[in-house]
């Protein structure tokens, strides 16, 4: 009976030794795997909480990378749009310089035709820049959505230019910026927003002068967008010798309303008169020269920057004398300055969007560093601690192997002959 107990005890000791060796070998293998991968948590079963924290950090890092790729695409589109606006501003300024030169009294009609041809080339370039697309074929100035060519014209209908899209500007978010700019706001005019009007004077003989200054908005909320006509009558001698007087009537040709006649106070017959017109709601301008019976001044809102350029080209090309050329130049310069202001504002907005993209990138980089730290703390292995644990486990495993080998020798057969 005692021999049976001995045999059972010896077998149990061998089994325990084998299980201990297997456990130590498994632990040593796991530590080696941790050292090789550099991670403390290789599988979710190693530490479920840490594995979940690491997975959340990895997902957020992947989302940031996706957002950064999208932001880079938007940044490139806005940079191209800002460059296009810069090109448009440069072309309009060149157009303005040529327009100023066309007002010289020393030029002949043929000279003004030559200048008009140059202006025509610049206008075509400006329209091409306004319809410029990005590398994906999307209009850079397409606002909230537009056709492949946002700006259509010149058209035979009224208005002569139109924006083939939905005006407006996409809002930025915490991680994105718009991919396009509002071309309608940059190139198109709205009467109540901009108050841009064009005034044309009827044909004036060479021996007489009659021009107007640029129409200036004084209260844009009052601007109606209607068309007007000013007609002079009762022009003749004044109450005093050497003076003249005149009367004009303002007609709203859109509604048909006619104002009461306005009498201009006596003015010297040998000098041009300056008449300040403030009867049009929200607008004002001056009439300078020598009016005569039947002289008319027509006013209509200008729908776009392109319309202003086309009007300047048409009037400079057809100007029969310096009086008509001066009128064309004055109107064009006033409206171009308003248009340039809108272009500068939109270009400034594009610059702010690029700055915002840089700030978003900086914030995302900081978040990436923080998330990478969270992931590292959750799953990465302390290499010094890992090497120390591996060496300790290796020493223990070697000791277990040696002790098992020594126990294996404790057999009766080792002592028999």
Image (tube, grey):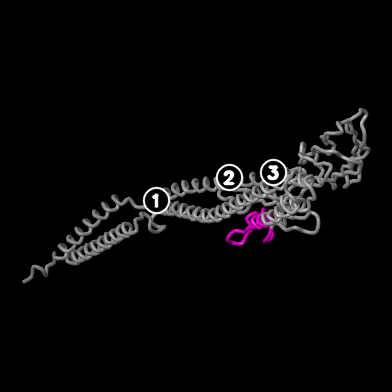
Q: Which mark is residue 321?
A: none
Q: CA distance from mark 2 to mark 3?
A: 23 Å
**347 to 147, vertically: above or below:** above
**Labels 2 and 3 touching (C-beta < 8 A):** no
Q: Which residue is mark 3?
A: 337
Counting residues from the N terminus, which is met first, the one under dot 2 or under dot 1?
A: 2
Tag in front: 2 or 3: 3
Task: Determine whether the residue tagged by mark 3 lies in a helix, strand or loop.
Answer: helix
Residue lying furthest left: 417
Residue at x 62% of width, y 55% of height? 140
Place of residue 275 in the rendered image (x, y in percent of width and height, measured from the top left): 83, 35
Residue at x 74% of width, y 55% of height? 162
Tag in front: 1 or 3: 3
Q: Where does the magenta region start and end?
A: 123-149
Counting residues from the N terminus, which is met first, the one under dot 2 or under dot 3?
A: 3
Q: Which residue is mark 2?
A: 352
Q: Which residue is mark 1?
A: 376
Residue lying furthest bottom: 417
With 360 as the anchor, is 106 left or right in this view?
Answer: right
Q: Image quadrant for the C terminus?
A: bottom left
Task: Determine whether the residue tagged by mark 2 lies in a helix, strand or loop.
Answer: helix
Q: Image quadrant for the N terminus?
A: bottom left
Place of residue 174 in the rendered image (x, y in percent of width and height, measured from the top left): 57, 47
The answer to whether residue 145 shows anywhere in this view is: no
* Neighbourhood count class around disc 2 (C-alpha, 10 Å): few under 14, some 14–19, many 20 upward: few
């Amino acid at each position: 009976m005692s021999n049976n107990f001995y045999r059972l005890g010896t077998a149990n000791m061998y089994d325990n030794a084998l299980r201990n060796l297997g456990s130590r070998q498994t632990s040593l293998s796991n530590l080696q795997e941790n050292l090789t991968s550099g991670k403390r948590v290789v599988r979710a079963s190693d530490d479920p909480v840490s594995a979940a924290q690491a997975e959340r950090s990895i997902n957020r890092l992947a989302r940031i990378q996706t957002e950064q790729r999208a932001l880079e695409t938007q940044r490139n589109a806005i940079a191209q749009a800002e460059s296009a606006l810069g090109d448009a501003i440069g072309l309009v300024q060149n157009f303005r310089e040529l327009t100023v030169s066309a007002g010289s009294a020393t030029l002949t009609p043929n000279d003004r035709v030559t200048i008009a041809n140059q202006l025509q080339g610049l206008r075509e370039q400006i329209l091409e820049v306004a319809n410029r697309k990005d590398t994906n074929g999307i209009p850079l100035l397409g606002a909230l959505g537009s056709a492949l060519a946002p700006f259509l014209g010149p058209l035979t209908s009224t208005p002569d230019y139109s924006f083939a899209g939905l005006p407006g500007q996409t809002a930025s978010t915490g991680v994105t910026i718009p991919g396009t700019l509002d071309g309608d706001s940059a190139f198109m005019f709205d009467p109540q927003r901009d108050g841009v009007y064009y005034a044309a004077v009827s044909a004036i003989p060479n021996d007489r002068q009659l021009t107007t200054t640029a129409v200036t908005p004084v209260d844009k909320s009052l601007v109606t967008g209607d068309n007007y006509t000013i007609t002079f009558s009762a022009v003749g001698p004044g109450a005093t010798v050497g003076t003249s007087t005149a009367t004009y009537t303002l007609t709203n040709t859109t509604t048909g309303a006619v104002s009461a006649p306005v009498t201009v106070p006596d003015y010297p017959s040998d000098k041009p008169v300056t008449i300040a017109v403030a009867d049009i709601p929200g607008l004002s301008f001056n009439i300078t020269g020598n009016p005569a019976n039947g002289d008319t001044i027509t006013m209509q809102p200008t729908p776009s920057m392109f319309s202003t350029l086309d009007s300047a080209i048409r009037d400079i090309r057809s100007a029969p004398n310096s009086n008509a050329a001066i009128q064309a130049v004055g109107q064009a310069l006033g409206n171009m300055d308003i248009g340039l202001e809108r272009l500068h504002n939109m270009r400034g907005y594009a610059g702010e969007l690029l700055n915002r993209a840089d700030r978003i990138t900086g914030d995302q980089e900081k978040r990436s560093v923080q998330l990478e730290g969270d992931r590292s703390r959750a799953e990465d292995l302390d290499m010094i601690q890992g090497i120390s644990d591996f060496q300790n486990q290796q020493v223990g495993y070697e000791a277990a192997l040696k002790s098992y080998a020594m126990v294996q020798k404790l057999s009766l057969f080792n002592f028999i002959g």
